[in-house]
Image (cartoon, rainbow, N blue to C red):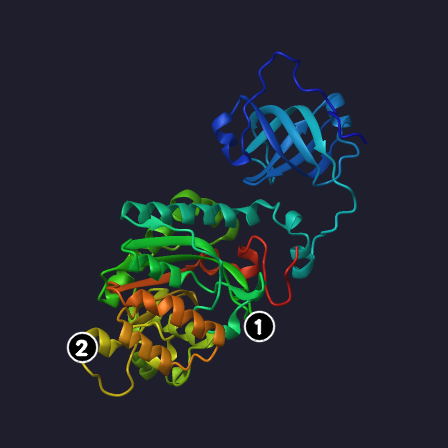
Amino acid sequence: MSTETLLAPPAQGLRSPPKVFIEDLPRHLDRPVLLEGWLVAVRRSRSLSFLVLKDRSGEVQGVCRDELAASLQGLNPESALRVQGLARRGRPGPHSAIEIEVQAIDAVALAQAPLPLQPGATEEQRLDHRYLDLRHPRKQLIFRAQSSLEAAARGFLLQRGFLELHTPKITAGGSESGAAVFKLPYFGQQACLVQSPQFYMQMAMAAGMDRVFEVGPVFRAESAQTNRHATEFTCLDVEQSWLEDTGALMDLAEALLREMLSAVRQRHGAEVMRSLDLPVEVPETPIPRLPLALARQLNPELAGGRLTHQAEQLLCKHARELSGHSFVFITDYPAADRPFYTRHRDAASGQEGQGAPLSCSFDLLWRGMEIASGCLREHRHERLQRQAADAGLDDQALSHYLQRHYLPMFRHGCPPHGGFGIGLDRLMMALLGQPSIRETSFVYRGPERHVP
């Protein structure tokens, strides 16, 4: 069948009706509208034919009469259509709220049959054909909500005097260890993709920019294959100068998160509840702050070593039981468990503590997983140099980068500062109750997947 118009639109010279998204149809009742989307299905009765059309915002039923009904023959599901008609109140049925009295159909691009993605497809099949997988309005809700989330974050930070930066994604050394970086040849030298923009955010602090943020990709060459890990993901990183208190940094992270989630609840809360049966949760009261040592006293299962995912789940459960809160800050990690650049508690207070030193750091957990991590940075050159040596950073490229480009930034009056990063893919996973980060990544990257 040709992709030419099946039934001609209104004659030349007449104004075309306005383009409308399906979710906005209630504001256009009894008026002509133009819909652009994909065919879901065709149904027929004795005297009428019905088409179901979808776009990024929802689905709607169209009623086709007379010769227009014949034009539906040969249209396969997922064909791209323009449909003109009148928006009417619907009749009883699954698409009952609004109905379109179809007046013209333009088949813009026909879909070949059979479709490569069928109901019951595996996750791998869905990722292979992501362009079809994402056509469902419920899937696109994830990214519309994320767009609102990021817009709210930008508005919040810009109003508070933060500057938005775009830092390099190619560098000479990793920010934490050389083992988890993607290495690549670079004009006869070796470079790598950045694990975090943090070093460049700290450069902005040394440059006197006072407060900055970035939304961008980060890369981790980690082989973990879990529902929470990806080798490329999007992170919101924030850095601010003249901070001496971890609490002030957590206050900023909490206020920012509340603003972001409030925007999603305001703009998409009803749709999230309708589509996913899940309320958009916003932390209305201060988020509990639980020192790691106290958490381990309260729950012996958390003793020893770094927190596992199971431990994070236990901590969230414990926080909810104690405070009714599903968010919890875990603070005061041992200095030995944090990278060399994190400020140590005894250094921050000027007092030598008893036992192993603690770091001025925190993780933010929500619904059983880490969604953010932050710390005060060590800004004094001599102490930072000593911490780097104590950390035993033996990767040659990283060591060279530190000595030539990172440590010198702190020799000429770098102010005290701190920052945090929020993994947006994980945040969306927790926010919308998704089973995997694969669902909240536009195109997922993991150890086993670097296509499409």
Residue occupied by mark 1: 223
> Judging from the image, what secondary structure is the residue with disc 2 in?
loop
Decide: few, some or many residues near mark 2? Use Cα within 10 Å; few <14, some 14-19, many ≥20: few
Looking at this view, name the residue that lies furthest to the bottom. 355
Kind of residue indicated by mark 1: Ser
Q: Nearer the viewer, residue 170 or 152?
A: 170
Q: Nearer the viewer, residue 134 or 224?
A: 224
The quarter holding residue 391 reads bottom left
Considering only vertical position in the picture, is 272 above or below 24?
A: below
Residue 187 spot, x, y in % from top left: 58, 61
Residue 198 spot, x, y in % from top left: 39, 62
For the question of whether residue 333 can be seen, the reply is no
Q: Nearer the viewer, mark 1 or mark 2?
A: 2
Circle number at residue 350: 2
Side of 111 relative to 338 (left or right) = right
Residue at x 76%, y 27% (from the top left corner): 71
> Judging from the image, what secondary structure is the residue with disc 1 in?
loop
